[in-house]
Image: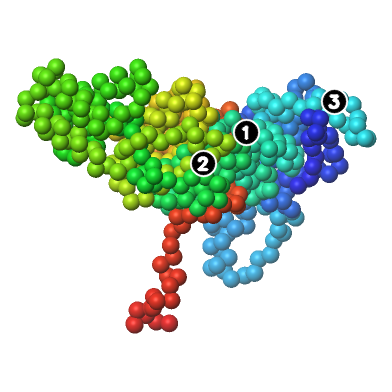
Amino acid sequence: MANIYKESSLGKVTVTEDHEVVIGQVICHNGTPTTSKICARIDPAQHPAPGRIYAVKGRNPGGEKILILVRVEKMWEHNPHEDALSSNINQVIPIEIAYAKEGQSTVIYRAFEADTLEEISFISNGKRNGEEELSLNINNVTTLPRSGWPIIEVSDELISKALELAPDPDLGLDIGHIHTTNIPVRLKRDVIQTHLFICGGIGRGKSYARGVIAEEYWAHKICQINIDPMGEMVEATKDLGGMNIKPGEGFTLPLSALQAADVVDAIPGHARSKTTNIFSLIKYAHDKLLDEKVSKLGQEFGVNDLVKKIEDVADDIGYGAKGTLYPALLKAKSLSNFKYIGDPFDWKTHLQDGKIINIDCRGYSVRDLRLITASIARDIQRLAKKREIPFVVFSMDEAHLIAPNDDNVVTTQVLREIARIGRHYRIGLIMTTQSPADMDKSILKRLLTRMIFAIESDQLQAIRGVFSDAPDEIIKQLPKLPKGTCLLTGVSETIKHATLTKVRTRKTTVGGSTPNVFSSDKRRPFPNKEK
């Protein structure tokens, strides 16, 4: 690509227009050009692709040089020699017909439609080393592109600047590069505070991308806690010098990290029975302990404390009868069977210097997964509010199971709060799912940076609101995106325009890959299978 407008280290740009590569020119077609969309005839020697970014070169009403960046949406060919009628005649009457090809014919051409992105105007600062040096201003498009204006290639640096990507790897998160180009995609570090959403079908690259994000956060010394239901991040965590811990095996959570509703939900029994006096007594005792120990003294408590509190308060609230008290005590004691309920984990000691802590939840049920996540979330919230831990990113795979679209699920409630105000307490979120249609919508809309991999069409309907300014033509391609390529979208403070992005190669070990069942020599074709 020609370096027509190249940014220098001084924040200026130099112009070397002798090396311009012209892609085509703006044409008047189907009500275009407008300030939001153009159509262009393609130069016969050029081969643009959907998603590529070029520039319309012209002048604004004040006579200043401008570039209007455009993103190719769709392309087509016009060839009247091969329309339906002509093609049919050629088949019925087998006479060889020769006609001039594109570039020589006056009626054959290719064209594309493109969205306008940004308008760049230039202010001259004189010449430097024989080349004109300019300052540039990037704003919304206000100048109407004119038919006949040339469309040219522009430098990678200028495209990155217009997309508001980080100019340097040390100042951003190196995600990969723009699809079909070598333009690096480096997200500004601010995205860490705006929550991240990753979705895609099975085996399309979402967990791989989560590993890339983990590497980048680690490089920038951001602490991470990851809920790992499938063991996807176990090896990567080892590579990054982090901790893999399994609930109940060297890692437990205090009962005080749960709310009363969580405790009741954890105790086996039918939902209808949990409205009885027995469960009301357990709730009351647990709430009293939260108030007396956690809120007032900052202390934790366990199952034995809850059992004793039930005995202490039963008579006070009229639940001292044996038919209520004894069953309540038995049910409270049953919480000891949860091997992950015990002493509090020392988050303050371990969350230092960009440490990653991976909670290996393989083998746990969805109910356990939700309780573990809710407990950790509340622990982290409490410590973050007191400024006792550094900024931490709390992430989870299978987010549709952990935070479903259900007001009664405890993890949905607590993660809604983190999504809403977590950034004020220095907590970030990363949520990864293959089924966004089943995720809580309130949480989803607050995840302001999104990586959308190939996903089924029915799932696309559930995330219609997160595509930012991605054109319909690119959205239609989502179910068929190549593995490892995503549509990167966000708000103006994360990424200015939706961009097809090829995720970079991981540096850490990839875990949780789908096994190849045909890789074993022990499998043989069926006897009647033809060779």
- Element under label 1? strand
Q: Nearer the viewer, residue 72 or 500?
A: 500
Mark earlier in primary sequence (2, 1): 1
Does residue 362 sit above or below 270 in this rendering?
A: below
> Visible in this render: residue 522?
yes
Give me the C-alpha separation between circle 2 and circle 3. 49 Å
Picture coordinates of residue 121, whole percent (x, y) = 75, 27
Does residue 345 sit above or below 387 in this rendering?
A: below
Q: Which residue is mark 3?
A: 124
Q: Which residue is mark 1?
A: 188
Q: Nearer the viewer, mark 2 or mark 3?
A: 2
Picture coordinates of residue 279, whole percent (x, y) = 16, 29
Pointers 2 and 3 in contact (CB under 8 A)? no
Farthest residue in the right direction?
Answer: 130
Q: Amino acid at mark 3?
A: Ser
Mark earlier in primary sequence (1, 3): 3
- Element under label 2? strand
Q: Amino acid at mark 1?
A: Lys
Give me the C-alpha separation between circle 1 and circle 3. 29 Å
Q: What number is the disc on residue 356? A: 2
Q: In the displayed structure, does residue 187 sit left or right of residue 210?
A: right
Does residue 452 sit above or below 140 in this rendering?
A: below
Q: Nearer the viewer, residue 142 or 11?
A: 11
Q: Nearer the viewer, residue 34 or 298?
A: 298
